[in-house]
Image (cartoon, rainbow, N blue to C red):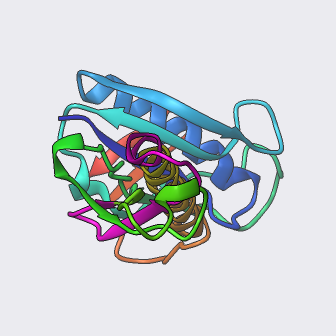
Amino acid sequence: MMMELQISSGQGPVECELAVGKLANALCKEFDGTKIKQAMPGSREGCYRSIVIESNSDLSFLEGTIKWICPSPFRLNHRRKNWFIDVSTLAEFDSIAIDSSLIRFDTFRSNGKGGQNVNKVETGVRATYVPLGISAISTDERSQSQNRKLAMERLYRLITEQNEGGRRETDRTNWLEHSRLVRGNAKRVYEGQDFILINK
């Protein structure tokens, strides 16, 4: 099963953005079946605000802070040599797959169109997707079969909208992770321009 990790510079400077790219490349070399899925460029070439990698290895042990010890390659004589980036597991979005066998149909007398059938024949239809308790009705048409079709179309539309809302919320959660960076207690420490791993 593939997992996704987001490597982020948080609100860090360009050196942190460079570390994001270096870590992504290092992990792709270290773990077979790991590749870059998505990248958000930073302020300079080779620098990234965030990178999403996917892997068939379990990399959840990396979740947290990564430390890179290196003099700034961009600002000569800059005192700081410790740069921190964040690794987080991305929240997964579970799309709702609609199983038509789980749709329950109820009929009722309709006050809508129907000519002489109004209030005499049950032409109105309510379609309910039982696992979610979402319902849609139709009383627009004169026949039960037409209303059944319309109610089903509306139900599919409602479930699709719920899927889209869930996807937006997942994207928002993942974006908030981009801003979360806690320094200290590094999961791994790398050193130098060659990004050498000095502790695991």
Q: What range of the chain is rendered magenta?
A: 127-149
Is 71 situated left or right of 187 in this image? right
Q: Position of residue 171 (x, y in %)?
A: 55, 57
Front-most of 188 and 41?
41
Q: How many marks?
A: 0
The verdict on residue 118 being magenta is no
Q: Is residue 164 above or below residue 126?
A: above
Q: Residue at x 51, y 67 (%)?
A: 173
Q: Residue at x 33, y 50 (%)?
A: 96
Q: Position of residue 174 (x, y in %)?
A: 51, 61
Q: Residue at x 57, y 59 (%)?
A: 168
Quarter-of-image position of residue 119: bottom left
Q: Position of residue 83 (x, y in %)?
A: 58, 61
For the question of whether residue 200 can be seen, the reply is no
Q: Residue furthest front?
A: 116
Q: Position of residue 118 (x, y in %)?
A: 50, 64
Front-most of 163 and 23?
163
Is 122 situated left or right of 18 in this image? left
Front-most of 36 and 148?
148
Quarter holding the N terminus is top left
Q: Residue at x 16, y 44 (%)?
A: 101
The verdict on residue 130 being magenta is yes
Is 33 situated left or right of 35 in this image? left
Quarter-of-image position of residue 125: bottom left
For the question of whether residue 60 can be seen, the reply is yes
Front-most of 102 and 139?
139
Is 76 situated left or right of 48 in this image? right
